[in-house]
Amino acid sequence: MLEYGTGNVNDTYLVTVSGSDETHFILQRINQRVFRRPELIMVNMRAFTEHVRRRLSNGAADPSRRWDTPRVRLTADGQTHWVDEEGGFWRALSFIDHAQAYPRIRDSAHAREAGYALGRFQSLISDMDITTLHDTLQGFHITPGYLQHYHEVIAHPKAPIDSPEVRYGMRFVAQREAWASVLEQAKEAGRLRVRPIHGDPKVDNIMIDDQTGQAVSIIDLDTVKPGLVHYDIGDCLRSCCNPLGEETDKIEQVQFDTDLCREILAGYLPVARSFFTPPDYDYLYECARLIAFELGLRFFTDYLEGNVYFKARHSQHNLVRALVQFKVAESIEAHETEIRTIIRDLR
Ligand code: GN1
Ligand code: MG
């Protein structure tokens, strides 16, 4: 059993079984500080898998392409999970064979496939009844809620705040605070609809086939729940268009690559067209900027709170991660006209 992947929340292991036909599977311990009711994740996963299976056998399959979905592997007594003596919540998932996920986008073909994968994933669940999905993580991607929490934390910070980096971060957040409810307001006003979403379609969760280079799955289904598809598109863009990746420490060199952005949207929009409405296009620029800002804010708050949410390898880790996302957001702002032109041309 090997520790596997680079998840910031759960513990993930790759288990190799000798002498069985399915030789690998993924074993995970859910972080219950983050996911307070992990059993709801398993209920959602079953509903999701069943829905996708039905769609694929009723005409949604594309015979020219492979598409896989991680399946829950049941315990010997038929349960979706196992709780250990200390209350640890464990579950096993099938391994997507002959494919891998990468921490950064490698080239434009990879970017286009990432965009396609997100469109494909969302369209397969776009007709799912959202009332059948539990909210596995309340407040997830509700930016005004993260801001409120940030203010509570800076009133009593657990980390030193008298550094140029922290002052930069505080200024960065303050200057964007009024704008940060842009998606929530559009939702309230009925311009954007709540739909089933993935919640975390970063580059590391998009599986690429070893042979064909095509995207074959999006893994990490813990946050499949009702939300705005814009949270997903924003997350995919902020992650995939940052060539240095979110774990870099070369903060000054962080950029949002608009060529990659064009590829992602060129892969995404033709598939998303089946469920997109006209106002959905109007928030594509904002969602990229917002989710980069929001993830920066979440890392920044976690640094100030003493690293209680994201796993951190050293005391400054979440501060560095925050600065990277703030740079991504800044670069998106600097390329606003270009990004809006890309969106208009692909519409
Ligand atoms: C977390 O655990 P992981 O690495 O799949 C986080 C996402 C962030 C991501 C940034 C439940 O995902 O929201 O975008 O880190 N997941 C949760 O890498 O908070
Ligand atoms: Mg995740």
Image (cartoon, rainbow, N blue to C red):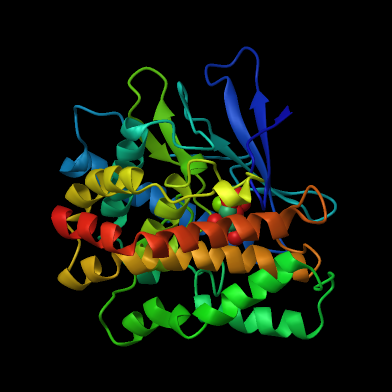
Residue 76 can be seen in this image: no
Q: Position of residue 165 (x, y in %)?
A: 71, 65
Residue 169 can be seen in this image: yes
At horizontal 66% and vertical 50% (from top left) the residue drawn is 8
In-image side of 291 versus 32 (left or right): left
Relative to 237, does residue 71 appear above or below in the rendering? above
In front of the other: 309 or 241: 241
Quadrant containing ligand 1 reads bottom right
At horizontal 52% and vertical 82% (from top left) the residue drawn is 177
At horizontal 54% and vertical 37% (from top left) the residue drawn is 103
In-image side of 172 versus 280 (left or right): right
Extreme residue in the top direction: 19
In front of the other: 173 or 269: 173
Q: Position of residue 256 (x, y in %)?
A: 43, 51
Q: Position of residue 114 (x, y in %)?
A: 36, 41
Picture quadrant of residue 111:
top left
**Quadrant housing the N terminus:** top right
At horizontal 33% and vertical 63% (from top left) the residue drawn is 336
Q: Position of residue 278 (x, y in %)?
A: 16, 70
In front of the other: 7 or 267: 267
